[in-house]
Image: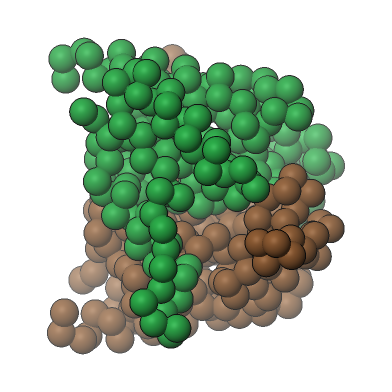
Chain colours: A green, B brown
Amino acid sequence: MLTVYLAGPEVFLPDAIEVGERKKRLCSAYGFEGIFPLDNEIVPKASSERIDRLIYRANEAMIRRAHFGICNLTPFRGVSADPGTVFEVGMLAGLGKRVFAYTNVAPDYFDRTKRTEALAFDSGQKLWRDTHGMTVEDFGNADNLMIDWAVAERGGYPIVRHDARPMEIDRDLTGFERCLRLAAEAFARPA
Amino acid sequence: MLTVYLAGPEVFLPDAIEVGERKKRLCSAYGFEGIFPLDNEIVPKASSERIDRLIYRANEAMIRRAHFGICNLTPFRGVSADPGTVFEVGMLAGLGKRVFAYTNVAPDYFDRTKRTEALAFDSGQKLWRDTHGMTVEDFGNADNLMIDWAVAERGGYPIVRHDARPMEIDRDLTGFERCLRLAAEAFARPA
């Protein structure tokens, strides 16, 4: 049975374990074994051991063990995805594993950025700049182009975008289930 | 000569090429060849080719070619680092390459988050939560623990934190040069 690493900011929710269990049950329904960061019980053996380091090591070991990843790229504390999850997209890609991903906020990166700060059009370069003078990517992607294209190139499908209801943004699994269907399709095809 | 991939949000600056040249000159002074994303001239061969996809492919090829990376993790459009750079930290780590990193904002992730939104202390779980009820990491790290520990484990040194003057935040190379010194030290040591 193929093992899928379940990356996303839901690990920070008060009901994280329950959300993880819902994800794992859906994985089983599609014939995959889901592994979730909080499956590891982190117990420092000595008081000098740093819990954050143990969490890093446990997560890295899970990512290495997984055959592929499904990553929740819903915006987190700002315009972009949770940076822990983005790091994991990169690690999965570097390890040559397939990556599927979804976001519960459908509007693209440029639109989201425009809503949060005043942008200025640089007519010489024909692009938009933020208040630091920095270019704002306007390719229609869900997030920074490295993330969108890593998912498209590694998983074979673009990031799944679903507009969850505001109260459900952190827990809606519609896009997640769509990723499971794409993964089932991808692994059923001859490589 | 060892080649170093220069990751960071300075690619979005109006004077990105100049900042990249300054970084590459510093690399040479430490005996490294610096490669910068904008070294690639991206010219689509057909009008149907997407520029963002070509940029992704060119950057990935550079990362694969590099022996190691130095990543600018200065906060970008929010409390965390540029997600493109964070993705690249993950890819470098997944490829088993050394990663060094710096930030031009010294206060830690928890302190920065506390300044931007109202946090509530969850006395049952003994941790801080944001307005979504999501845990705010309070380990003293510069960013999400996956990023800090990937750098510490892959490069051998914590993220270099330097408090640049506000006007210099996007261009100050003090922390970058410190990373070059650490890299020179690391590669001089027997593995």
How many numbered marks, from 0 up? 0
Q: Can residue B96 be seen by looking at this rendering?
A: yes
Quarter of the figure with the C terminus of chain B: bottom left
Q: Position of residue A34 (x, y in %)?
A: 36, 34
Give the image quarter of residue A169. Answer: top right
Q: Measured along the vertical axis of the image, is residue B27 above or below residue B81? A: below
Q: Is residue A137 left or right of residue B17?
A: right
Q: Position of residue B187 (x, y in %)?
A: 24, 80
**Measuring 22% from the left and 14% from the top, which residue is drawn there?**
A188
Q: Nearer the viewer, residue B84 or B93?
A: B93
Q: Is residue A164 left or right of residue A100?
A: right
Q: Nearer the viewer, residue B149 or A40?
A: A40
**Measuring 61% from the left and 35% from the top, which residue is drawn there?**
A74
Q: Position of residue B85 (x, y in %)?
A: 49, 53
Q: Is residue B11 left or right of residue B5?
A: right
Q: Measured along the vertical axis of the image, is residue A43 above or below residue B175? A: above
**Measuring 79% from the left and 49% from the top, which residue is drawn there?**
B131
**Measuring 41% from the left and 73% from the top, which residue is drawn there?**
A44
Q: Can residue A134 be seen by looking at this rendering?
A: no
Q: Nearer the viewer, residue A81 or A67?
A: A67
Give the image quarter of residue A115. Answer: top right
Q: Position of residue A33 (x, y in %)?
A: 31, 32
Q: Residue furthest front?
A: B124
Q: Is residue B39 left or right of residue A171?
A: left
Quarter of the figure with the N terminus of chain B: bottom left
Q: Measured along the vertical axis of the image, is residue B17 above or below residue A141? A: below
